[in-house]
Amino acid sequence: MDLIPAPRRFRALPEPAFTLGPDTGVRVGPGTGRAARRLRAELGAATGFDLDPASDGRIELALDPALGAEAYRLESGPDGIRLTGGAEAGLGHALQTLRQLLGPAALRRAPLPGTRWEVPAVRIEDAPRFGWRGALLDVSRHFLPKADVLRFLDQLAAHKLNVLHLHLTDDQGWRIEIRRHPRLTEVGAWRERSMVGFRAADRRDDRPHGGYYTQDDLREIVAYAAERQIAVVPEIDLPGHAQAAIAAYPELGNTDVVDTAALGVWTDWGVNPNVLNVSDATLCFVEEVLEEVLEIFPSTFVHLGGDECPKDQWKASPAAQARIKELGLADEDELQSWFIRHFDRWLAERGRRLIGWDEILEGGLAIAAEPKAAPVPRETSDKRPRNEGAPERGTSAPDREQPEVRPRSRAAVSSWRGYAGGVAAAKAGHDVVMCPEQHVYLDHRQAAGEDEPIPVGYVRTLEDVYRFEPLPPELTALDDGGAAAAHVIGVQANLWTEFMDDARDVDYRAFPRLAAFAEVAWSDLPRDPAARDWAGFERRAAAHYARLDALGVEYRHPAGPRPWQRRPGVLGRPIDARPE
Ligand code: ACM
C-alpha cells in the first residue's frame, strides 16, 4: 500500500475492500470525540461525505489503554473500518494511515468528482520508534506567516511527526510578542534588508523583511498542533544569536565593550559577536520573557539555544570578567554554563525542562550536588510597581525556601555538531535529541548539481536521509544494558531559513526528505543503514509524490529543481567533504 512511514506490522487480508459512501457514519467510542471530529473534518472535506455519527457507523473509533499512547491498530474489511488508539494521539496517527489507504485524493481539501473511496482489507499494528520526532522551523531568518506554520503542521501530522521546534528569535529577527517588553517586536521583528545567498555572494535585496506572531497567534498554533498530536517547543536563543533583542534593548548587550545603541537587527547571515551581557538585569529580563513564553507554550521542554556564542565580548568586558571572578569561575565557557544553568533551574522550578544545543555541555552541564547560587535581585529591568503580596518569582524566592543543593539537572541536549555531543550527554545521563547537521539539516543541498538553489552545506540526498541512523555505535556498543542509548529520546530534522524566503522554498528543501526522515523516526528500520531497503522506499516514495501533490507541497522532483525553483548565480556555501 506504499505507506510512509512504514508501519510495524501490516497484513493484507483476502477480503473485499470497504467503500466509503454518503451513508457511512462514524461510531465515536468513549474518549474519542476529539479524534472523531478531526476525522470527520479531514475525510469529510476530501470526500464531501457527512460521516455523521447518527448514521449507521461503519468507521469505529476506540481506545485501548493496553497500547502505548501513540500506538494504534487499523482493521478494515468489507463491513467497515475500526481504528483503535492507545490514546487520542494513536488515533490521530491511525487517521493519517487511513488517509493514505484511501488514496491521494483523501489528502485534498475538497472532493474530486468520480473518486471511489475504497479501503483495502488490512490489519495494521503500528507504534513509533522514537517519542520525539521533530522538525525545526527557523522563523527568524525568514518569517513564515501564521498560515504557513499551520500548513507546515498539517505536513508534520501527515508524516506522524510530533514536535515542532519553533526557532523564534535570532540575530535577524524576534518573532514572538512579549507584552512586557514591546520593543522586542516593535524594533526587533524586522530588518532593513537581507543578504541574498552567502557572504561571498555580496548581494543584498534592499527590501525590508519582518513579521511576528502575536501571543494569540501562537496560542492558535499551539492548539492547532495539539489537535494533531504535535507539541510546539519554543526556542528563545541565548546568550548568543541575540542581536535582534539587543537592537530593541541596547542595555542587554555588552555596553562596556561596544556601542550597542548603534546596533540594528542584523542584516547578515553567520555567527554574530554581539551577545547578551550577564548582569542581574539581563537575567531578570530573560525571566520576564520566559514567564510569557511559559504562559503560551504548555510543552514540557523549552529550548534556550546556547549555540554559537562567541566569547570575545565577554573576554573584553570588565563587567563579564568581574562576574567570572565573583562566581569563582574558570573562564568564559564556565560563564556561559552558569548562565544556562540559571535558566535550567528556573525552568525546573516551574515544572519545565530546558533543552539546548550541544554547546551547553561546554563548561559543564551536570548540576548534581552543586552549591546553591546567590539569588538574583530583581529590581533592575522593571521599574513598574510590583503587585504587593504576589509570590516572588525566579531566583528571588526567599533563601530559606531554597534547597541547600541544586537538584540534578534534567536538561536535554539537541546534538547538532555531529553525534559527539549527544553521545557525551547521553553517557552523562542527559536526554538527547539527535539532529546532526551532517545528516538532517534539511537546508543543506539535496544534490551536487549546479542547479540546486543556493547550495549550502553537505550534499544530503533523499537516500542519505533514509540511511541516517540516530543511534551511533558509540552508544549501542556500550556495555551498559542500553542505558545510555535509552537517553536518546528522539530525532529531529532542522530547517534553517537563511536561504528560504518563503513557504515554497521550505517545501522544496523539506520534501521529499522529510518523508524519509519521518520513516527513520517512526519505523522499525534495520539499524544498519546499509541494510535498509532503499529501493523499496524509492518505490513507495513514487506513490508518496501523489500525496504531496494533493497536499499542495512543492517538493524537489527526483529529476531536479524546476526552472522556477533554481536561483541562478546566487552563491551558497557548500561543504565539499562527505560527512563522516
Ligand atoms: C545551530 O545550527 N547553530 C544549532
Image: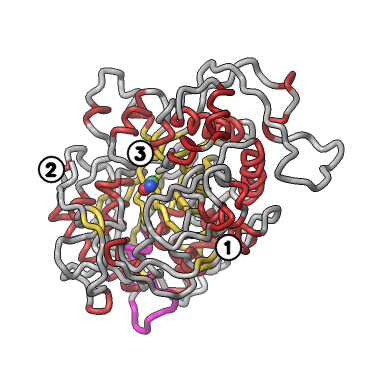
- Report the front residue among 481 and 288: 288
* Type of amino acid at the residue the image marks with label 3: Ser
Check the image and report above or below for 106 versus 536. below
Q: What is the residue that sits farthest to the right in this orientation?
A: 388
- Where's residue 516, x and y in %? 26, 54
Q: Which residue is depicted at the point 37% across and 71% down? A: 204
- Horizontal side of 438 relative to 334 (left or right) equals left
**The disc label shown at residue 213, or none:** 1
**Span colored in magenta:** 96-115
Please state which of residues 170 and 37 is positioned toward the viewer in this rendering. 170
Instruction: Indicate the position of residue 54 as horizontal and vertical percent values.
Output: 58, 67
Q: Name the residue under label 2.
A: 530
Q: Which of marks 1 and 3 is nearer the N terminus?
A: 1
* Magenta span includes 109: yes
Name the residue beneath numbered marker 3.
415
376 above or below 388?
above
